[in-house]
DNA sequence: TCGCCGACATCAATCTGGCTGATGCTTCGG
DNA sequence: CCGAAGCATCAGCCAGATTGATGTCGGCGA
């Protein structure tokens, strides 16, 4: 006997309950179905096995010898399944895997994740950083924090905060040209990652629509995280999200010459698969972010 | 997680195969269903658990951590179920329980059952004798041999042999009245169980329709088996099935004065629940009886 | 002894979960 | 750049599962 597709597995569950309760009627109650349905399933199972499992006695049913032998093993197997499935829930709730950018991880999560952990001692957090947006269908992960437009098919997204940017450089570098007084002054200095599309966006906001970046040597740092490091090191001017570098500005390691911020329309979002919105750990993280982000949107 | 009625058990079986084969398509082949159906069942299970179980990678799927933990336990549980269900077949085929009358058991089965056992060494036989016709729905038993008209609802019946009867007595008793020469002579002797309805049936066959049995003391032996014993002991005349007492006649313990046999229309039948006609042990016994009984009818 | 009650079987009708076939999407290999 | 492999999606269909009503049987109490 192998459990081929046509074997009535559901009938086994009904049998288990019935054997335990010694009653079709009560088994039906426990399973939330009618006595008729129980009778049908038991008969189906008996026909499949070719052996009667119950003796229909007045007032109650009794197991046949065959049924008597079968019942404990079936019960044990179902216990095992129930335990395995229950364990899934426990264990899977125990670890929250967050995918995000290195920048967001180091500048925001690093400072606030401790609060989440204190509030949710049962949940371990695993951070995964990557450049590209992950596909939940092919990479393990529970939630992601990404910049974008907030629309991803199949994913639920919550607005976290605007994504602004503005040029930053080290105070030392600014001093080499007698200080930065107007936007055009920046063009006297090396531009870090001049191919970054944020540059024309920002310069057009300050009225310099046709600034030419082609004369700068191309650089490709990849993550913004490295732009910042280069700027702090005095390598040139980087265009950065000021929200993330307040500390460096306060410490005098970076200097933000202009208050004006530009945006490319990509904001920060918390995203996760629509289908998993009710997972406990995801709910916990969502509520945490709601508290931490003043502009959080459902 | 308890295995409530709405939990998709079938999806677990699909999951087990898929986890083993690492492929929706091949799992579908093994289970005899389409890849579409596998996809549906896996998604159903994932939605129920609220956890992805597979990572959809190009060329093949891979288990998530959750799936990786779940798979072996589910596999083990299904192995246990398969073993239990397989064992049922083995064990239930190993014992054949026959319900019959004491008379048939002692006079026919006792002499022939050995042949069946030799031909079917794997099948143990258990005999149960009782006066009334058993109800397979409330008493354990595989087959029954009973006299009757051959029509029982829900039961398959095979004709075995006619049920005749004729008076018998001990030779010694016959000698006390100078021998039994004509049917009326019997009425000079004590009649065993005069209330047995076979008596008027037999006497009317020999032309004595109005024989009066009321003057005999009533006796109630129950089984025919005891009538015979009483007759052999010389207690009186019994009306018996000659098929069963050939040995006693040959040994001179019983004497059958007349060849004429009567019948009440009740014949011997082999019966068993229609639904179990394909059970191996029942098939084996049916074929055995077919060989042994010249008039066996399907 | 009669009649009611509890429990399972049966029946007819309904409904829905699961399956299929077609199609689309993505990736890999040539 | 195209074809093959593999999974997802969609719409439609059907058999099996479920239900409510009813039938049957045996036990129990008055």
Image (tube, coloured by chain):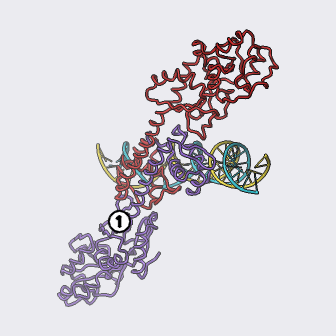
Chain colours: A purple, B red, C yellow, D cyan
On screen, residue A100 above or below B284: below
Q: Which residue does the image show at 38% across and 68% down from the upper left?
A: A143
Crowdedness near tag 1: few (<14), some (14–19) or many (≥20) residues, C-alpha within 10 Å: some
The answer to whether residue B174 is left or right of residue B62 is right
**Looking at the picture, does residue B184 appear above or below residue A10?**
above
Residue toward you, B207 or B144: B207
Near-viewer residue (A227 or A2): A2
In-front residue for pair A194/A55: A55
Residue at 47 percent of width and 45 percent of height: A70
Residue B241 visible? The answer is yes
- Please say if B128 is above or below A173: above
Picture coordinates of residue D13, whole percent (x, y): 59, 45
Residue hosting label 1: A133
Q: Residue at x 40, y 69 (%)?
A: A281
Along the horizontal axis of the image, is B17 left or right of A10? left
Image coords of residue A134 (percent x, y): 35, 64
For mark 1, name the chain: A
Which residue is painted at 52% across and 52% down in the image? A20
Quadrant location of the N terminus of chain A in the rendered image:
top left
- Answer above or below: position of A50 versus B227: below
């Amino acid at each position: 006997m192998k459990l081929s597709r046509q074997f009535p597995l559901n009938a086994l569950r009904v049998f288990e309950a019935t054997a335990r309760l010694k009653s079709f009627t009560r088994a039906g109650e426990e399973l939330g179905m009618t006595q008729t349905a129980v009778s049908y399933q038991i008969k189906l199972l008996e026909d499949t096995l070719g052996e009667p499992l119950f003796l229909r006695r007045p007032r109650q049913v009794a197991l046949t010898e065959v049924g008597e032998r079968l019942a404990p093993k079936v019960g044990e197997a179902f216990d095992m399944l129930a335990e395995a499935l229950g364990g899934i829930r426990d264990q899977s709730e125990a670890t929250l895997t967050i995918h995000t950018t290195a920048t967001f991880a180091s500048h925001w999560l690093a400072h606030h994740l401790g609060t989440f952990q204190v509030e949710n001692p049962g949940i371990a957090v695993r951070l995964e950083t990557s450049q590209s947006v992950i596909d939940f269908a092919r990479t393990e992960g529970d939630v992601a924090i990404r910049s974008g437009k907030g629309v991803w098919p199949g994913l639920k997204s919550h607005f976290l905060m605007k994504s602004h940017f503005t040029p930053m450089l080290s105070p030392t570098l600014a001093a080499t040209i007698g200080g930065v007084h107007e936007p055009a002054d920046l063009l006297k200095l090396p531009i870090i990652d001049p191919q970054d599309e944020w540059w024309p966006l920002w310069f057009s906001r300050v009225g310099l629509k046709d600034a030419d970046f082609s004369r700068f040597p191309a650089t490709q740092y990849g993550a913004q995280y490295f732009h910042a490091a280069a700027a702090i090191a005095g390598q040139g001017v980087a265009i950065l999200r000021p929200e993330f570098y307040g500390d460096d500005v306060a410490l005098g390691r970076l200097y933000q010459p202009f208050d004006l911020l530009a945006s490319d329309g990509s904001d920060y979002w918390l995203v996760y698969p629509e289908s998993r919105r009710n997972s406990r750990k995801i709910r916990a993280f969502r509520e945490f972010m709601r508290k931490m982000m003043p502009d959080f949107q459902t």
